Image (cartoon, grey):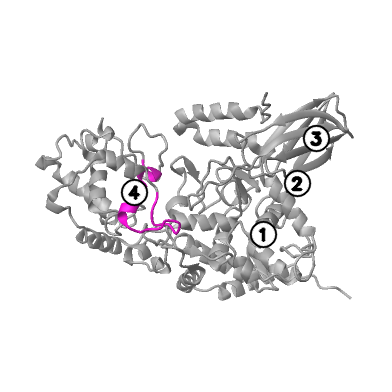
Amino acid sequence: MRRGLLVRPGAWAMATLLAGAAAQAQKNTADGIAEYRKMLEDGNPADLFEAKGEALWKQKRGPKNASLESCDLGKGPGVVKGAFVELPRYFADTAKVQDLESRLVSCMQALQGFDGAAIAGTPFGRGEQDNVTALATYVAAASRGLRFSLPQGHPEERRLYEVGKRVFYFRGGPYDFSCASCHGEDGKRIRLQDLPNLTKNPGDGVGFAAWPAYRVSNGQMWGMQLRLNDCYRQQRFPYPGFGSEVTVALGVYMGVNAKGAESIAPAIKR
Amino acid sequence: MHTIQLPAVPALVVTACGIIGCASMPSSSELDQQARAAIKASFRDQGIAKVDRLNQDLGQRACSGPTPPSPEVAQRIEADALAGIRWPESGRYLGDWREGEKLAQNGRGLTWTDTSAAPRDNGASCYNCHQIDKKEISFGTIGPSLWNYGKLRGVRDPGDAAAAPILQYTWGKLWNSKAYAACSNMPRFGHMQLLDEDQLRHLMALLLDPKSPVNQ
Amino acid sequence: MADPMRIRAQAQGDKAVVRVLMSHEMETGQRKDSAGKTIPAWFIQEVTASLNGSPVLTAQWGTAVSKNPFMQFTIRGAKAGDKVSVSWVDNRGDKRTDEATVA
C-alpha cells in the first residue's frame, strides 16, 4: 500500500534545519526559532481556537440564552477590534481593573447567566474554561498588528501598575524566585529559551505581545492567565487564582511597559 | 457679546487632575502593603506548594525590588547566611561527578505537580542558568559559565590544603548562595533543604574533580 | 460532528494553493496517561479533497502526523470561484467535511 503522507513539504526540511541549528545553538538559537515560527505561521493551530472563539462570541448560550455580542471589552459594547491592546483596564460596571480573560468571564456571567466563580475555579482546558481560552484567542486576533496602549487615566489603573511592579519583584518560595529572576535583565535565557526583559518594552511580538499563543510542544492554546499560572508553578510558588489581583496587576505592569509594541497574538510557540 | 475663550482651561484641568491623581495615589509604603495583601489573597495551596511559601525571610524581603538593599542590610544578610552554612560531614567535599551531571540536568522538584518535597526527588536545575560541561549546548545564561570551574581555579588535587578555600567557597555557595551575594538569583540548595549533603557532594565533584569532564 | 477545519484556497495563475488546518488530537497510541495507562490511538486515516465535486487528492495518514495537522497542496486548473471540499475519516469512524471557495 502506498502511503501518501502529505504533510507540508517544509516539515522534513524543518527537522533538518533544527538539527543543524542545534549544532550552532549559541549563535542562532533565536534566529532558528524565529525561522521555525515563520514556517508554521500559515498553519498555526491557534486559528482553530480563533474560529471556535468567534462562534462562541456570536452563539446564544447559557441560562439566559444570550450571545456575548454586547460584551463591553473596554471600547464599548460589542467592540472587539482594538480591545485586546488596551487590556487590562478599569471597568466601571465591575468597579475594578480587569484583564481579557476575567472580563470575558464577567460578560459570560452578566449577559449569559453563567456562574463566573465556577468558571474561574474550573481547571484550564476543561469545560467553560476551555471556551474562555477560545474567546480570548478570538478577541486577541482582532487586534493583531495593533500596538499596545493600555490606559492609565484611572487611579485604579495606576495603582495596579505599581502593585504589579511590586509583585513582579516579589521574591519567595523555596527557590527565592521572583518574576525578575528570569525576566529582569536583557539578553538572558533559560536553557535555550530566550527570556524577554519585562521591566521595559521588550519589542514587537515579544513577551506580553506574544500571548495568547499555541504551544506546539503540548498542543495547547495558552492565554496570559495560563502563562502566568505556569510561570508561578515553575517558580515553586503556590497556585495563583484565575483572574486574581496578582495576575491582573502583572498584566497591567507588563502591558504598560509594552506600550507601543506590536501584538502578534495569537502567536505560535515551540 | 464676547464668548470668553479659556485656552488655559485644559492645562488647568490637567494640573488639577494631576494634583488629585497624585493625592489619590497611595504612598510607596502603602503600595508595598497593598501588594503584599494582593499576594496573600491571590494564591492558594496546590499539591505540595503551600501558601506558607510566600512568607518572606529578611533576605527575600530586602531583595524584592529593582534596587538592591543598603550595604548594611546586604552585609547582615550575607553574614547570617554564612553563619548558617552546615559544612560537610568529616570534611568530605566531593562525591561522584557522574551523579552530579545527572543532578545538574534534572530540573524537577518542588512544583505543585511534583508529588514529593524530599531532596532525593529533586534535581538541581543547574543547566537552566549555567553552562557547565561544554558538551551540553542547552544551557542558560542567567548565571556565569562554570566550564573549567576547578581548572581555572587551579584545583589539581582537591585533597591539597591549597584547594581548601575554593572547596569551602563552592560548598558555601551551593549551600547558601546569599552568603556571598545578598540578592543572588541562585537558590539556596542546602539552606532550603532542596538537596541533601550527598547530592551537594556530587555537584561539588562535577565542578571540582580533576577527572570531571568540566575540568578537561 | 468534529470541530471544523479552516480551509483557505488562493488562486495563483492557473493553479490554486489550498491550505487546510484540521482540528484533531492525533493520538499515536504510544503515550501513557499519568496513571500509566496507554492512551488509545486516535488519528485521521484518510483525507480526500475535491474540486467542484471531482476528487483531486487522496491521502492515507498514520500516527506520524501531528496533532492539529496542517496540510498544503496545489490544484492545477482551479480558478477563483471554484469550490474546494476537504474530508477526513479517522480510525474511530469520525468524519468531517468542510468547504471553501477559491479566492
Residue appearing at x 26%, y 63% in the figure = B76
Question: Where does the magenta region start and end?
Answer: B108-130
Circles 4 and 1: CB atoms closer than 8 Å: no
Chain containing mark 3: C
Question: Which one is in front in this view, the residue at disc 2 or the one at disc 3?
Answer: 2
Q: Residues within 10 Å of mark 2 (few under 14, many from 20)?
A: some
Q: Please identify the quadrant where the N terminus of chain A is shown.
A: top right
Residue C82 at x, y = what percent? 88, 33
Looking at the rendered structure, whether the residues under marks 4 and 3 are on a common chain is answered as no
* Quadrant in which residue A83 is drawn: bottom right
Looking at the rendered image, the disc whose residue lies closer to the viewer, 4 or 2, is: 2
Mark 4: which amino acid? Ala
Inter-mark Cα distance, 1 to 2: 18 Å
Q: Is residue B118 magenta?
A: yes
Q: Are marks 4 and 2 on the same chain?
A: no
Residue type pointed to by label 1:
Val
The residue shown at (75%, 46%) is C4
